[in-house]
């Protein structure tokens, strides 16, 4: 019996510790391992990188054999075997090798961007779940309070001290409160389902109802520098500029001659000839327009990169300003809550003593709960903005 109890206690501790360890960071680690889209994109990134490497290979050798019959028959037969290999000017291979290296860096940055977006969505879902659970606690309390008031007015009506209008109002408030709880439960279920989908269909053990303390944000200038070095979206845009500029060099290299070397064997009746094949292309009609197009693409990529940098700076500045506004608003709401700490008990005593009407009661109580809900929502927004700003560190 003692062994059974010991086993149960140990199991409970393991579950409890596992639940504590499965905070937001634990959820993100699990999703990074299980997310099916990330797995698929990782395979795509590897395939693209391999494809970039194979784009700089020699062309296949060309082998040709010609067999001819003479007319009249006395003319005999002859044959010709030609094996050749073409290759570009050496500069072209060097340019394409650099291009392949840049493309692999681009694919890596693109995968990092997909990863960041996936983990940020998961983190924001966790933040939403915490806020929804806190809102549900408020809604549950509101529903319990409405149920108690409905019972009071039902008893008053039975005792002949109340009116049917007051009872109906109490019943309507109770129904609305219960419906509010049901709607929040639906939102919680939807968020949990989405989180499970991000986790590759595996259930996520996340039951937090409180946020971890927010770390102080880096100064805006330092955060901008960090984004310039690490933000995947900016790295993708920067790599596109490098690739576009290198593409101009590749197109210019295509205007250089191509060479062909090979072996030729010819034979006819009683004769054999062995020889060497040497050739060179003269790039008169190709290259100029392709180079112009590549330059235009490079200019476009540069403009897109500058636009992305400007967007990031503007967005960061706006988010930093929003953090200040949210922090100020949350402080004000908490101050109001502190002043209204005894407000609910006062209203409950007043309505039970018949000092206020049910309309005044619910109107005043709604103001209190509106303050609670607004503060919870503002705290959720603050967490979301911090998550967005710090997404570069995911």
Image (cartoon, grey):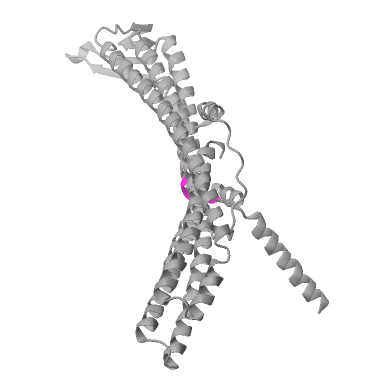
Specify the farthest residue to the right.
2
Specify the farthest residue to the bottom.
159
* Residue 158 is at least partly visible in this image: yes
349 to 289, vertically: above or below: below
Specify the farthest residue to the left.
72
Name the foreground residue: 136 vs 107: 136
- How far across and how far down the image is residue 300, in percent? 33, 22
Magenta stretch mostly in which secondary structure?
helix
- How far across and how far down the image is residue 332, in percent? 52, 50
Q: Which quadrant would the C terminus be assigned to in this image? A: top right
158 to 331, vertically: above or below: below
- How far across and how far down the image is residue 247, in percent? 38, 18
Name the foreground residue: 388 vs 139: 139
**In this rendering, would 168 be left or right of 331?**
left
Name the foreground residue: 232 vs 218: 218
375 to 315, vertically: above or below: below
Name the foreground residue: 141 vs 181: 141
Residue 337 among magenta residues: no
- How far across and how far down the image is residue 372, in percent? 50, 60
Q: Residue at x 37, y 77 (%)?
A: 172
Q: Residue at x 42, y 93 (%)?
A: 160
Specify the farthest residue to the front.
355
Q: Which quadrant would the N terminus be assigned to in this image? A: bottom right
Q: Which residues are magenta?
A: 34-38
- How many numbered callouts? 0
* Residue 54 is at least partly visible in this image: no
Q: Residue at x 45, y 65 (%)?
A: 184
Q: Residue at x 46, y 44 (%)?
A: 40
């Amino acid at each position: 019996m003692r062994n059974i109890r010991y086993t149960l206690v140990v199991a409970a501790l393991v579950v409890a510790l596992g639940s504590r360890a499965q905070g937001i960071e634990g959820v993100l680690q699990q999703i990074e391992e299980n997310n099916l889209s990330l797995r698929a994109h990782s395979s795509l990134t590897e395939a693209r990188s391999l494809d970039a490497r194979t784009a700089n290979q020699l062309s296949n050798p060309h082998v040709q054999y010609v067999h001819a019959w003479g007319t009249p028959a006395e003319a005999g037969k002859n044959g010709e075997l030609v094996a050749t290999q073409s290759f570009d000017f050496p500069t072209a291979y060097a340019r394409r090798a650099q291009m392949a290296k840049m493309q692999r860096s681009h694919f890596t940055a693109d995968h990092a961007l997909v990863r960041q977006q996936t983990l940020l969505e998961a983190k924001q879902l966790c933040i939403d779940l915490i806020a929804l659970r806190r809102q549900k606690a408020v809604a549950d309390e509101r529903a319990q309070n409405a149920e108690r008031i409905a019972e009071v007015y039902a008893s008053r009506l039975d005792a002949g001290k109340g009116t049917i209008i007051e009872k109906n109002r109490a019943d309507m408030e109770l129904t609305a409160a219960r419906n509010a709880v049901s709607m929040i439960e639906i939102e919680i279920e939807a968020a949990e389902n989405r989180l499970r989908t991000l986790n590759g269909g595996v259930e996520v053990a996340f039951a937090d109802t409180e946020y971890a303390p927010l770390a102080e944000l880096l100064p805006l200038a330092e955060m901008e520098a960090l984004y310039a070095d690490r933000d995947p979206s900016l790295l993708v845009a920067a790599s596109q500029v490098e690739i576009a500029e290198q593409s101009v060099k590749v197109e210019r290299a295509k205007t250089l001659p191509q060479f062909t070397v090979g072996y030729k064997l010819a034979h006819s009746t009683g004769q054999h000839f062995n020889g060497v094949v040497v050739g060179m292309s003269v790039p008169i009609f190709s290259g100029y327009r392709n180079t112009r197009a590549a330059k235009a693409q490079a200019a476009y990529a540069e403009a897109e990169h500058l636009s992305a940098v400007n967007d990031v700076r503007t967005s960061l500045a706006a988010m930093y300003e929003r953090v200040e506004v949210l922090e100020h608003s949350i402080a004000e709401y908490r101050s109001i809550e502190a002043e209204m700490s005894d407000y609910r008990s006062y209203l409950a005593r007043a309505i039970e003593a018949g000092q206020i009407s049910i309309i005044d009661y619910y109107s005043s109580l709604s103001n209190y709960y509106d303050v609670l809900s607004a503060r919870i929502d503002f705290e959720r927004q603050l967490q979301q903005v911090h998550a967005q700003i710090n997404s570069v560190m995911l």
